[in-house]
Image: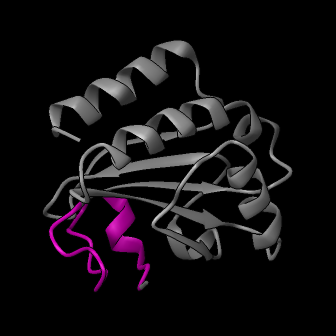
């Protein structure tokens, strides 16, 4: 997966060769981040929603530390199915903290982004944005 900063900044469209016209929910996280761990039930809800769409969207998780196995283990322990789990550098993704969640539409444009602890209000906002894109 080709992760380039402009794909995350909202200034242009994603240029990932794997995008293929799918909406994407991208989560940048680490296995030790308490806010990431707290948000796992939300990520599971998103994963289940994506599974019901029949392949019209993807969940991509970017581990911001070399501990990609720890991230995979966390996702597995909560039944979260990601289309891709990649190791990435925060600076390369223009990420300043974890978790960072991006929602890209089918054209690859960032339509929603959030950094930090996901409050219930922000969870509802994200789920509404997903519904608006028919995910």
Instruction: Farthest residue to the top: give it.
Output: 121
What is the x, y in percent for residue 42? 55, 31
Q: What is the quadrant of residue 34 in the picture?
A: top right
Instruction: Name which residue lies at 70% across and 67% down.
Output: 64
Work out which quarter of the rendered image holds the C terminus and state it.
top left
Q: Is residue 102 above or below residue 134?
A: below
Instruction: Name which residue lies at 57% across and 59% down.
Output: 95
- Magenta residue check for 35: no
What is the x, y in percent for residue 87? 65, 77
Front residue of this view, candidates 33 and 50:
50
Q: What is the quadrant of residue 109 in the picture?
A: bottom left
Q: In this rendering, would 37 be left or right of 12?
A: right
Front residue of this view, candidates 116 and 52:
52
Q: Which residues are magenta?
A: 2-22
What is the x, y in percent for residue 90? 63, 68
- Magenta residue check for 10: yes
Instruction: Name which residue lies at 16% across and 31% down.
Output: 132
Q: Is residue 63 above or below residue 23?
A: below
Instruction: Name which residue lies at 53% across and 55% down.
Output: 81
Count of marks overlaid on the render: 0
Q: In this rendering, would 72 be left or right of 109?
A: right
């Amino acid at each position: 997966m080709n992760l380039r900063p402009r794909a995350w900044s909202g200034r242009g469209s994603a240029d990932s060769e794997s995008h293929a016209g799918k909406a994407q929910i991208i989560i940048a996280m680490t296995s030790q981040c308490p806010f990431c761990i707290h948000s796992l039930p939300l990520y599971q809800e998103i994963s289940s929603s994506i599974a019901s769409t029949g392949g019209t969207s993807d969940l991509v998780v970017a581990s911001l530390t070399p501990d990609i196995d720890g991230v995979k283990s966390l996702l597995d322990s909560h039944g979260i199915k990601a289309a891709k789990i990649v190791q990435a550098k925060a600076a390369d993704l223009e990420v300043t903290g974890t978790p960072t969640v991006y929602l890209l539409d089918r054209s690859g444009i960032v339509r929603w982004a959030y950094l930090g602890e996901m409050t219930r209000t922000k969870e509802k906002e994200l789920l509404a944005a997903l519904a608006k894109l028919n995910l």
